[in-house]
Amino acid sequence: MKNVLFLTLFTIFHVIGQKTPETPVNIILMIGDGMGLSQITAGMYSNGNKTALEEFEYVGLSKTHSSKNLVTDSAAGGTAIACGKKTLNGFLGMDLDNNKLSSILEICKSRGYATGLISTSSIVHATPASFYANVSSRRQYQDIALQLSENDVDYFIGGGKKHFQNREDDRNLISEMKDYEMVNSLNKFRQSTSNKLGFFTYYDEPPRINDGRKPKLNEALTATLEKLDQREKPFFLMVEGSQIDWGGHANEIDYITSEFKDFDGAISVAVNYVNLNPNTLLIVTADHETGGLAITLGKTNPYTFRSDFSTGGHSATMVPVFSYGACADKFSGIYENTAIFEKMLETVKGN
Ligand code: MG
Ligand code: ZN
């Protein structure tokens, strides 16, 4: 009798300990801001005709237009992906009628997931802010900072400390964020045992990777995944390669390809994580293309090319969606950018 009981208990614990298909899916969403196919192509050839994106199993195309403009900005583009609603350019986490929207990060958090945001811009910039802020102008940096301080994202890494410390209302949001441990280096981030951890990489906007930006995105992602992996819960993590867009605005191909390379290094880290943790969905996409970039001439061996830009702004061209790991098959096909939110939500526990 004792033996039977022991065996039964052993079997139950054994089953619980295993990752069954019912185990909630971790989500890693990577957004290359302004990363259209030409940016990927340029980055790939600059890197000897290689990119981590070649590992991916499924590719889709996302229509990036905002509610009234074919050419979106990063606020409306981020909101579509984060919250599943097309809105006006400049709006963050708000629909056309000024209703506040819930983001996939907030929905995951309310269902017991751990959450994280990593950005190579300031953490209050439009793309990361679309996951926690509700404002009618992306320029309301002080309001956006206040909303991050009240949001409870478990781990964040990005620039823009000044919006939390040097404020018109004289508040010091960093000292108000008492649940958090704030660190000023990636080593301290790694060493911390806190479940609420913020790392302001720069006081203002971080510099270009070619001007020495630290940490590299692959290092920031590795450190954050180590934290998330230790939690006994599923997670949602957004990782942005922010400055691919800024290279597009500057019409500087080296700026684009170097920022793409930094982002591509982080994609490799994420792919490896999925290989070790198959219960993870990895999505890599863009909010829009920037620069109207084309590669118009070039040679192989070694790979060199000429690039031409058609605008200093964004373009309306569709952008690719690469997916890998659990539920990745959902993301093939052509769909609106808002469908990225819906497809992620389908994988979330409790739906
Ligand atoms: Mg951005
Ligand atoms: Zn832009």
Image: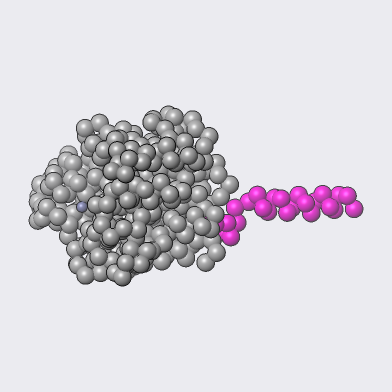
The stretch of residues the image draws in magenta is 1-26
Residue drawn at x 57%, y 56% as measured from the top left: 23
Q: Is residue 10 left or right of residue 32?
A: right
- Looking at this view, is 149 or 301 the one in front? 149
- Looking at this view, is 115 or 164 the one in front? 164
Residue drawn at x 27%, y 52% as measured from the top left: 140
Image x and y of residue 239, in percent: 36, 47
- Looking at this view, is 20 or 88 the one in front? 88
Image x and y of residue 293, in percent: 14, 53
Using the rendered view, name the quadrant where residue 203 is placed.
top left
Using the rendered view, name the quadrant where residue 81 is placed.
bottom left
- Looking at this view, is 162 or 264 the one in front? 162
| Figure disc tally | 0
Residue 116, compared with residue 292, is above or below; it is above
Image x and y of residue 286, in percent: 29, 55
**Does 49 appear in magenta?**
no
